[in-house]
Image: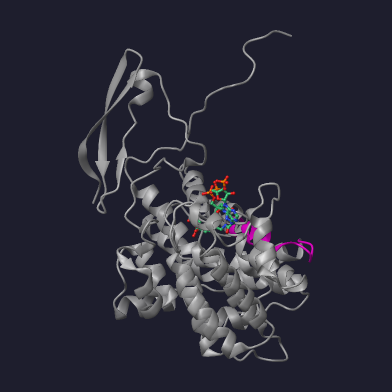
Amino acid sequence: MSAKDAGEATLQYGDQSITLPVREGSEGERGVDISALRKETGLITIDPGYGNTGSCESAITFIDGEKGILRYRGYPIEELAEKSSFLEVAYLLIHGELPNKEQREEFDLDVTRHTMLHEDFKKLFGAMPKSAHPMPVTAAASSALATFYQEPETAEMMERAVVRLLAKMPTIAAFAYKHSIGQPFMYPRNSLDYSSNFLHMMFSVPCEEYEVDPVVARALDLLLILHADHEQNCSTSTVRMVGSSRAPLFASISAGISALWGSLHGGANQRVIEMLEQIEREDGSADKFLERAKDKNDTTRLMGFGHRVYKSYDPRAAILRKACEDVTKRMGGDVGGLLDIAMRLEEITLKDDYFIQRRLYPNVDFYSGVIYKAIGIPVNMFTVMFAMGRLPGWIAQWLEMRRDPAFRIGRPRQIYTGETERHI
Ligand code: SDX
C-alpha cells in the first residue's frame, strides 16, 4: 500500500507561491512532497540531521516517539519479544508476514545450512591485528562476502544472499572475537538454534564444549529481536543510500555496520557499560555523574539516554530492564552492581528537570550492555551484537528500496557558502 493524498500545502516566498501535495501514511503521518520544489522555484529545503525530512515511504516498521510505540509490520514489539524467535522476526521483516510452521522450519533449516564460511575466508581475520575492534573486522568481512558470492541479482540469488548474510553474520562475529583472543575458531553446529549456535562459537574451545543455558540463549534471542529494525535510523539510511547506487547487498550492509559503530548510534551500548564501570570505580555516585552530564561545559553525556524519535520511554528499554533483572539474577557475577547504578541513574533522571524538559529517557542501549556483560560477551563486542540484531532490518529496508520501481540514486543538494569565483 502507498501513502494517500491528504490535500495540499502552499509555500509563499516573495512573489513566488507553490502548492505542494501532502501525503498521508496508514498511521496518519503526513509529509509535504517537495519533489517539484526546486524545478518550480529554484528553492531547496535545508534540514541538518534530517530530523524533519522523510527519505521514503516504508511499510516495515512504525514508531510513535510520543507514545513509545514500536511495531514491526504492524505487530507490537512487546508481543514479538514475548512470542517469537529472532529468525521468525527476521522472516516477518523481510517477507512481510510471520512464517507458518512449514515456512519457519524451511527458513530455519536454510539458515542453519549456510552458517559456514569458505575456508579461505579465515585468512581475512588473520590479516587483522589482534587488537582490532571487531566492528571494522565485521564490516570488512561483510564486504568480503561480495568477493566470494558474485552472482547476478536475480530474485533467486537475492533470496540466497539474504540467507547467507543472516546465517554467516554470527559466524563472522564469533570468528572476529576468537581471533582477538588468540583462540581457534569454533565451527557452527547444525544441531543448535541460532542464538545457541552463536554462544557455542563464542565460548566453546576445542577441549571443552560451552554448555548453553536456555535462559541465556532466550535472552540473546530477545536482544536480537529488540534490535531488528528501527525505521530510517542513521545506519539504515546508510544502507539505503549505498544500495541506491545499485551497490550489492553485502557492500551496503558493510556500510551500515560502519555507520552503526559511531558512539551516538550503536556504539552507545559499549559506552554505557564503560560509563557504569567508571561510576562504580569512582565513588559509585550516580548523582555526581548526572551533574556532569547536565553541565553545558562538560562534554559528558549520559550514554544510553535520549533519542531523536522517542520523546517518551523507548519501549525496548522497558523490555530490556525486566530481562536484565532476570538474567543478572540467573548469572550473578559482578554485574549486579552495574545494574543497581543503572537503575539509580534512571530513577534520578525521571525526577530531574534537565532530563524531563529535554524528554530524555533510557533508550535501547541503556540496559542491553548489562545483559551482554552478564552473558559474558566482552564489551568491545556489544556493537557487533547490535549489528547482528539489526541485520534483518537493514536487509528488509534495502530490498524495499530496490524493489520500488520509482527508486532513484540518493543525491541530496546543498547551500554553498564557500568563496565566490576567484582566479589563480
Ligand atoms: C540508537 O535513530 C535510531 O532509531 C537509533 C536507535 C536504533 O535503534 O537504530 O534507536 C539506536 O542509536 C539509540 C541512541 C544511542 N545513543 C546514545 O545513547 C548516545 C547519547 N544520546 C545522545 O547523544 C542523543 O540523545 C542522541 C544522539 C541519541 C539524540 O540526539 P538529538 O536528537 O540530536 O538530540 P540533541 O543532541 O540535539 O540533544 C537535545 C538536548 C541537548 O541539550 P540542549 O542543547 O537542548 O541544552 O538534549 C541534550 C543535548 O545536550 N542531550 C543530552 C543527552 N542527549 C541529549 N544530555 C545529556 N545526556 C544525553 N544522553
Question: Residue 233 location, x and y as percent?
Answer: 48, 52
Question: Residue 256 location, x and y as percent?
Answer: 55, 53
- The residue at 38%/63% (across/down) is 70
Question: Residue 230 location, x and y as percent?
Answer: 44, 58
Question: Residue 362 location, x and y as percent?
Answer: 52, 64
- The residue at 49%/71% (across/down) is 224
Q: Which of the pair 345/270 is nearer the observer?
A: 345
Examine the residues drawn in magenta and state their main secondary structure. Answer: helix
Which quarter of the rendering shows the C terminus? top right
Q: Is residue 135 magenta?
A: yes
The residue positioned farthest toward the top in the image shown: 423
Q: Which of the pair 33/315 is nearer the observer?
A: 315
Residue bounds of the magenta highlight: 128-143
Q: On the picture, is 381 further left or further right than 317?
A: right
Q: Is residue 107 above or below residue 2?
A: below
Q: Is residue 87 above or below residue 355?
A: below
Q: Quadrant of residue 197?
A: bottom right
Q: Is residue 421 above or below residue 372?
A: above
Any part of residue 165 in sight:
no
- The residue at 37%/73% (across/down) is 78
Q: On the picture, is 391 further left or further right than 384?
A: left
Q: Is residue 395 magenta?
A: no
Any part of residue 223 in sight:
yes
Q: Quadrant of residue 77?
A: bottom left
Q: How is the image coloured?
A: one colour
**How many numbered marks, from 0 up?**
0
Q: Which of the pair 76/124 is nearer the observer?
A: 76
Q: Is residue 185 above or below residue 63?
A: below
